[in-house]
Amino acid sequence: MDPQGKSVFLTGGAQGLGRGIVEKLLSLGAKVLFCDVDVERGKATESELQTQYGADVVFFHPADVSDDEQHKAAFGMAVSKFETVDICVNNAGILNESNWEKVMAINAGAVIRGSLLALEHMRRDRGGRGGVIINVASIAGLNVNPACPTYCASKHAVIGFTTSWAMSPGQKDHAVRWCCLCPDAMETSMLKVTDIHYPEMLEEYLKDNGVMSVSQVADAVMKLIQDPDNNGAILEVTLKKGARYRRRQVVDRDGVNDLVIMDTY
Ligand SMILES: NC(=O)C1=CN([C@@H]2O[C@H](COP(=O)(O)OP(=O)(O)OC[C@H]3O[C@@H](n4cnc5c(N)ncnc54)[C@H](O)[C@@H]3O)[C@@H](O)[C@H]2O)C=CC1
Ligand SMILES: CC/C=C\C[C@H](O)/C=C/C=C\C=C\C=C\C(=O)[C@@H](O)C/C=C\CCC(=O)O
């Protein structure tokens, strides 16, 4: 899908990757409404982006996406501003190993709610125009990670949910494309979080693997949006190997043993 002239709803856009994605989309001619729980930063970001791109193409709406009503109201605001939402990016996420309920509510719960809101609005078999849902997971959703088991579980949930909807027999009728983004470490405030186990393991990991810029990862999100044939894609982005699709398939290897889930590049 070409972002030019399209309408976007994105969560967690006040800073970090969310803001980076908003900026790329605006530069490609999309209109964006983003929400965030950080009201001060959200307003400041809205003001800076309106100055750069125009007051009628980017809007901030305060919302905590772990709250059902606030999340629905923010999505509804995007629909009423733009009439339709073509692209939904469920990006808001936190890292906090001391509060597993909150991590699951934001990283998994709000991604599920946001996806279902978008699906209901977009699905062509119920009068919508189709669209794309991008769910932000992490490389941690594909690996094990003793530094942050809860975060890791929340990101595995995002990938399982997104790829399962992508394989729905109704997907062609819905005309909604489902994609997951799995970045390696990025230079954002999340990497400053200290509430993890074994911080020295993370430090070692970052030394070996490096840290990406937000811009590099936001470019990969544009690839996800623009490629029309990537329903079900898991886009892994790392500093060393760049953006690579992993495709998840359920495979019957021999007709005898259990089906297995396989990722291929
Ligand atoms: N920074 C990294 O190394 C990586 C981050 N990610 C994922 O990227 C996404 C964006 O994270 P970053 O930009 O790195 O973090 P960040 O902390 O810089 O930005 C996250 C934004 O989400 C907002 N947010 C948090 N909870 C919210 C809530 N309940 N309701 C609404 N907004 C909320 C924050 O206020 C903030 O503006 C997250 O899903 C994160 O898990 C994935 C892989 C690597
Ligand atoms: C701790 C998570 C930090 C930020 C979250 C964000 O999503 C960043 C993710 C990117 C990479 C994080 C890697 C962290 C690695 C570690 O902390 C090591 O403990 C991992 C060690 C072994 C796991 C085996 C593996 O590498 O797959």
Image (tube, rainbow, N blue to C red):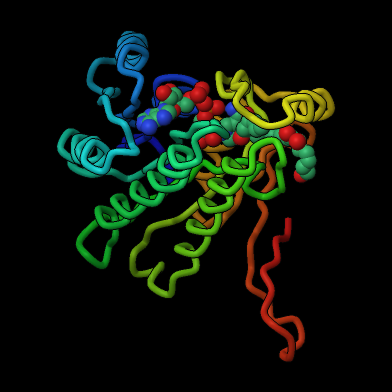
When the figure is inspected, residue 58 is found, relative to residue 147, above or below; the finding is: above
Residue 19, horizontal then vertical, whole percent: 45, 23
| Nearer to me, 128 or 194 | 194
| Nearer to me, 141 or 16 | 141
Residue 159 in view: yes
Residue under the point 58% across and 51% down: 156
When the figure is inspected, residue 149 is found, relative to residue 27, above or below; the finding is: below
Q: Quadrant of residue 187?
A: top right
| Nearer to me, 35 or 127 | 35
Residue under the point 69% across and 46% down: 244
Residue 96, horizontal then vertical, whole percent: 54, 31
- Which quadrant of the figure contains the C terminus? bottom right
Residue 257, horizontal then vertical, whole percent: 74, 86
Residue 3, horizontal then vertical, whole percent: 40, 37
Q: In the drawing, does residue 234 fall left or right of residue 170?
A: right
Q: In the drawing, does residue 197 fall left or right of residue 90?
A: right
Residue 219 in view: no
Q: Among all residues in the image, which is located at the extreme bottom?
A: 256
Q: In the drawing, does residue 222 fall left or right of residue 51?
A: right
When the figure is inspected, residue 177 is found, relative to residue 13, above or below; the finding is: below
Q: In the drawing, does residue 208 fall left or right of residue 33?
A: right
| Nearer to me, 105 or 2 | 105
Residue under the point 45% across and 42% down: 101
When the figure is inspected, residue 235 is found, relative to residue 119, above or below; the finding is: above
Q: Among all residues in the image, which is located at the extreme front?
A: 98
